[in-house]
């Protein structure tokens, strides 16, 4: 039951049944007062934000995302996806891209392909440019690879990039290992000039 709280809230939000879902969530809020179940608490954070009116939603999303959700990468990524979607619908497309990129990266890495595809669709709707193959015929970077490449080009270390994207430094290293051949470069120092060249 506890694992379904998030999906109940999401289904209610998409179907317009906010009020009915809020009654159920309210009952679960009372249960949460007498239980230490961390799973219930993280799912309720998501549910509160998703079911909130626009005037309250952003604060609830930011509160949820400020918590340590390391043990629940799926919940965190779904919250980022919901927040990015909300931002886009508030016509704040530029702000929406950061949580949507993070959501797509995590959801892709954990194999949640349906939701990763949803995040990608939201990114496109938010104006994320889909990278085309470069003029020399080398493969295009995925949105996640492009984000990592840009951060590395700015001089961030693998650890710093990982902290921003909620990935391990080792995972960032693996991404860069695949990015360099795609860009036909051999070092981080070449990233900035190559990304600039591809953008022109």
Image: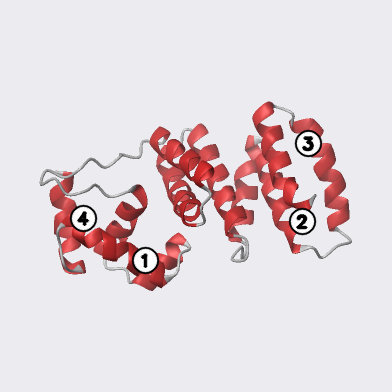
Q: Where residue 21 is drawn, which disc sits there?
A: 3
Q: CA distance from mark 3 to mark 1?
A: 39 Å
Upstream in the sequence, badge 3 or badge 2?
3
Residue receiving disc 4: 182
Q: Residue at x 55, y 38 (%)?
A: 86
Q: CA distance from mark 1 to mark 2?
A: 31 Å
Q: Where residue 172 is drawn, which disc sits there?
A: 1
Upstream in the sequence, badge 4 or badge 1?
1
45 with respect to 92 (left or right): right
Q: Residue at x 86, y 59 (%)?
A: 33
113 with respect to 53 (left or right): left
Query: How many circles with numbers are drawn on the protein?
Result: 4
Local crowd size for mark 3, using a 10 Å CA cut-off: few (<14), some (14–19), many (≥20): many
Local crowd size for mark 4, using a 10 Å CA cut-off: few (<14), some (14–19), many (≥20): some
Q: Where residue 40 is drawn, which disc sits there?
A: 2
190 with respect to 3 (left or right): left
Q: Residue at x 43, y 41 (%)?
A: 120
Q: Position of residue 147 (x, y in %)?
A: 33, 54
* Above or below: residue 14 compared with residue 103: above
Residue at disc 2, secondary structure: helix
């Amino acid at each position: 039951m506890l694992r379904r709280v998030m999906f109940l809230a999401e289904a209610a939000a998409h179907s317009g049944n906010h009020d009915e879902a809020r009654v159920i969530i309210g009952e679960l809020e009372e249960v949460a007062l007498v239980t230490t179940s961390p799973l219930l608490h993280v799912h309720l954070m998501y549910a509160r934000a998703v079911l909130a009116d626009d005037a309250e939603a952003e604060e609830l999303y930011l509160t949820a995302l400020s918590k340590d959700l390391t043990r629940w990468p799926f919940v965190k990524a779904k919250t980022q996806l919901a927040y990015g979607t909300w931002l886009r619908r508030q016509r704040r497309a530029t702000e929406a891209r950061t949580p949507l990129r993070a959501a797509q990266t995590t959801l892709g890495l954990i194999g949640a392909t349906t939701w990763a595809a949803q995040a990608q669709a939201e990114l496109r709707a938010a104006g994320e440019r889909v990278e085309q193959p470069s003029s020399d015929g080398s493969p295009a970077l995925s949105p996640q690879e492009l984000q990592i490449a840009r951060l590395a080009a700015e001089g961030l270390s693998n650890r710093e990039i990982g902290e921003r994207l909620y990935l391990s430094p080792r995972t960032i290293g693996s991404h860069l290992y695949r990015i360099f051949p795609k860009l036909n470069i051999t070092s981080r120092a070449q990233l900035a000039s190559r990304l600039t060249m591809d953008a022109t």
